[in-house]
Image: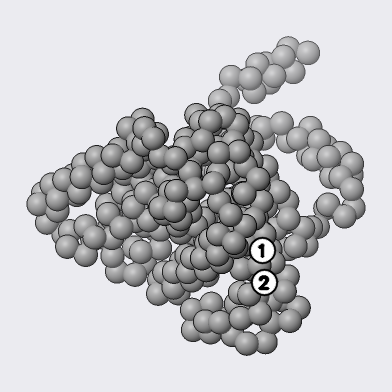
Amino acid sequence: MDAEHTDKAREEELTRWERERAIKAGSPDAVPESGPRAQRIKEIAHDKTPEKLKNPSDLQVRFRTGFVYVMVSILCVLASNWTMLALLVVTAAICSGEFFYMLRSDAKLPNELVGAIGAACFPIGVFFWGMAGGLYVAILLMVVLIVWYVLYQPARVEDVAVSFFGAAYCGLLLCGLLVVRMSLPKPWGAVLVLLLFLSVWGSDAFAYLVGRKFGKHKLAPRVSPKKSWEGFVAGLAGSALFWCLMTLVPGVSMSLLEAVAFGLVSGTMGVVGDLAESRIKRNSGFKDSGTIMPGHGGLLDRCDSLFTVSITSVVLLAGFGCIPLAGL
């Protein structure tokens, strides 16, 4: 009885780190952490999992990941300006990290820390100081990169350029969504931004479904071999459809003809953004920008079209007087 009590006390005294060291060293004092019990829990969970979910197909994994991404985006867009800001800051930081990671494989030496912080600061600057805030962040980022270039001897001019471009590409372009959201009173600014998101997702869905079924003529075989002209046309139709719905949003002064034209331009720029990111990956030797989204690749793979659509939408809506920009 005393021996059993001593063994139990001895086991409780071992920390996780000590157990791992003891196991690696092959010590007889090593006690596996919760071994049989943890295994039983895993077996019970596995038995209770529906058969169709135990070994999901690539399409199922892609759907589940996409569903989570879409729901988080919708909730953040509709909840408040602060949640929208948080969504854009996190998106900019993660996408810039993936961008710099790929460029390092292409013999570039960007300042990843400064670039990622700069990308995250662009939405913050626009949120608090309007469009002038984006200019403030850009100037500060350039000054910091110049100081880094002077002090860090291995840095080259192209490394400074890549660092600045990555931050602006992943952070500054997304600020268009903030400008659109803050141009209209609640809740219509959020509704308008949601329709922009839906125009991107709808364009991608239309292009994928039609291109997969009827696509025969390659759009850009050297950059993105799977894209077809048939899918491109279908994607434009999907984009125009959601832009037509924007005419119903109170505060938006846009005719149906303008909505169709703007939808076609926006859809085209979405494809340009997609092809630009595809070329970055191809030049760097990557199939996906990352692994954060199972079935999709990286977050940058999901947001490439959104970058160009975001800034294009501001130019179209504000430039043609469809939304007010007072205070921005």
Q: Using residue 313 as the reference point, say whether residue 297 is left or right of it.
A: right
Which residue occupies the foreground of this view, 270 or 69?
270
Which residue occupies the foreground of this view, 171 or 17?
171
Q: Using residue 299 as the reference point, say whether residue 153 is left or right of it.
A: left
Q: Residue at x 40, y 58 (%)?
A: 99
Q: Residue at x 86, y 39 (%)?
A: 44
Q: Which residue corresponds to mark 1? A: 238
Which residue occupies the foreground of this view, 116 or 21?
116
Instruction: Determine if residue 190 is in view.
Output: no
Protein image colouring: one colour
Q: Using residue 53 as the reference point, say whether residue 70 is left or right of it.
A: left
Task: Give x and y (percent) for residue 26.
Answer: 58, 42
Q: Which residue corresponds to mark 2? A: 234
Q: Residue at x 66, y 67 (%)?
A: 237
Residues packed near mark 1 inside 10 Å, few (<14), some (14 to 19) or many (20 plus): many
Asked whether the beta carbons under mark 1 and mark 2 sit within 8 Å of each other, the answer is yes
Find the distance from the CA under tag 1 to the CA under tag 2: 6 Å
Task: Give x and y (percent) for residue 225.
Answer: 57, 81
State whether residue 76 is above or below residue 113: above
Amino acid carrying label 1: it is Gly
Q: Residue at x 61, y 81 (%)?
A: 229
Label 1: which secondary element: helix
Which residue occupies the foreground of this view, 64 or 87?
87
Task: Give x and y (percent) for residue 192.
Answer: 58, 43
